[in-house]
Amino acid sequence: MKKFKGISTSPGIAIGRIFLYLDEKLKVPRYDILPDDLEAEFDRFKEASSRATEEIKALQKNASERELVEESQFLESHILMLSDPEFLSSIERNLKSYLKNVEWILYLTVKQVVKKLESADSPYLRERTVDIHDVAKRVLSHLMFNERVSLSDLKNDVIIVCHDLLPSDTIGMKRERVKGIAMNAGGKTSHTAILARAFQIPAVLGLSDITDYARSAERIIVDGDNGVVILDPDKKTLAEYNEHLNEWHRHEKVINLQNKLACVTEDGKRINLYANIEVPEEVESVIEHHADGVGLYRSEFLFLQADGDATEEKQFNAYSHVLKSMKGKGSVTIRTLDVGGDKLIPDISVIGEKNPILGWRSVRFCMGRKDIFKTQLRALLRASVSGNLRIMFPMISGSDELDDILDVLEEVKKDLDKENVPFDRTIPVGIMIEVPSAAVTSDLLSKKVDFFSIGTNDLIQYTIAVDRGNEKVAYLYEPFHPAVLRMIKMVIDNANDAGIPVSLCGELAGEPKAAAVLLGLGLENYSMSSNSLPEIKKIIRSITMKEARKLSETVLGMDSAKEINRTITEWMEGKFGK
Ligand code: PEP
Ligand code: MG
């Protein structure tokens, strides 16, 4: 049994079998074996090698059928490498002398072969190093995984253990099969985290090196509430966790009783609770939770699902579906494409930017690709006749940028008018406040738009200069940093002065510890993943505005995030018990 501590990211407990998901950064596991295990280890290698050979033969057959002579010859050389007696005896020899698992031995042997080839006089031999790596990777993948299945094709219930997941992996995976996620990389507001919460999959991220220890198909526990992952749990731990799991289901039932209650503070102030969604199917959960509307629909996931080919029709259908489903139940705020940063979309994203988080992302990308942007705006405007739509632009950094974007929106409206295509002429247009320059100039920006939504995930990242997805700096990612709290307050005050509504749709909105402080700062509109709604409602219903204001005034006077955290924890314990 081995226990790991990471970042609790998506609540709930999952007990199941490991599915080690291969990606480029996955490290080769290294552990000791006993002399008695030597034969079994070598057999594992032979088995993996023969599976890899079958796979290459199939590729070769395909290449010859298509008369790809050169490719077929390369593949032939890969088959020869795998059956080379010298290579096989090096593996056997290294196994005996190092007494380590065969994945590691393969890695080591390949390193030795490559070293030899690199010093060869013949350029042909030197070029063969690429082939060696290719072949080794193929065998390794068979050694480390029972089956080479993609996440969209999972046949059994699994718990994914991996270095990192791309948003495209997460959006494309067979969700009903994924019972939990444990990942080396990632932080609380990384997009994998957001999707895990949206799909209600317990997840622990930021585990650094769990892939070095996890073995395919072994039992694992993911405790998303406490950020704990246990590999190969003993019987006692397993029994304890099964009990926690039962308790968790009981708690879920009780907390969901909140769904039908109104969100009013103890002294009668009505607060609006909206839901964030990433895919149109989530709208069912929004309705089940009786949210006041959709506060943030992250449209980029539609582009991800469509592999970059999100046509106007596809978008129109998705937006119309959400709007129709929510008709009479609340407004739907759809955010325009927020691609880039850690949300790369194959086919349309720029890969390899030096500073993607500060680079060509979001509205900056859209203004550079007006074809994509205008298509989305057309789809949105056309869909607006189906319900109560609000359009929101992300990553706004200042007034000039906003003016240019609003001009494009006007152009698209004119085009639709020319074509006699109907749309709602009163659609509110708003912006996300998630870049510090926008927060600081929110008094100016408030004159140009109908609403604000504070995106704390990015606002924290940019204010503290800390990558929200990097586990190594996750300790600095602090929502209660005084600078962040001041900025939130500044934006709320400026919106109030301008008489426009302001909501907060970053993960902080669904954080129980933040609920009272945000209320005290004047927040009246929260937007969060649906399953966080009942807990936040329960807290808001148990406090008065006076209490909330007092708490926020106290913490605004503090200079240390640690002290603020401690103060809020004590306040919550005093109010709700431990
Ligand atoms: C945010 O930045 O707070 C936000 C809601 O947007 P996203 O998490 O999609 O970047
Ligand atoms: Mg953001």
Image (cartoon, helix red, strand yellow):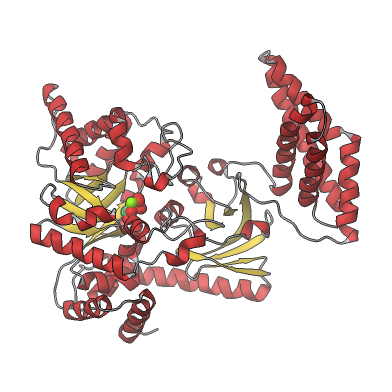
- Residue at the location (16% across, 50% down)? 328
Query: Where residue 506 sits in the image (x, y, percent)?
Result: 32, 58
Q: Which of 396 and 413 is in front in this view?
A: 396
Query: Where residue 261 sits in the image (x, y, percent)?
Result: 23, 68
Q: Nearer the viewer, residue 39 or 259?
A: 39
Query: Where residue 14 sits in the image (x, y, percent)?
Result: 54, 63
> Looking at the rendering, which quadrant does residue 307 occupy?
top left
Residue reaching furthest bottom? 574
> Looking at the rendering, which quadrant does residue 99 occupy?
bottom right
Q: How many tags in the picture?
A: 0
Left or right: 340, with 260 as reference point: right
Left or right: 29, with 525 as reference point: right
Quick check: 62 above or below 522?
Answer: above
Residue 185 seen by the camera: yes
Quick check: 497 above or below 425?
Answer: below
Residue 291 seen by the camera: no
Query: Where residue 168 sits in the image (x, y, percent)?
Result: 47, 42
Left or right: 312, with 347 as reference point: left
- Residue at the location (46% across, 52% down)? 192
Quick check: 426 above or below 566?
Answer: above
Left or right: 511, with 238 as reference point: left
- Could you tell me which quadrant the N terminus lies in? bottom right
- Residue at the location (71% across, 17% down)? 70
Q: Which of 45 and 178 is in front in this view?
A: 45
Q: Which of 97 and 75 is in front in this view?
A: 97
- Could you tell me which quadrant the C terminus lies in? bottom left
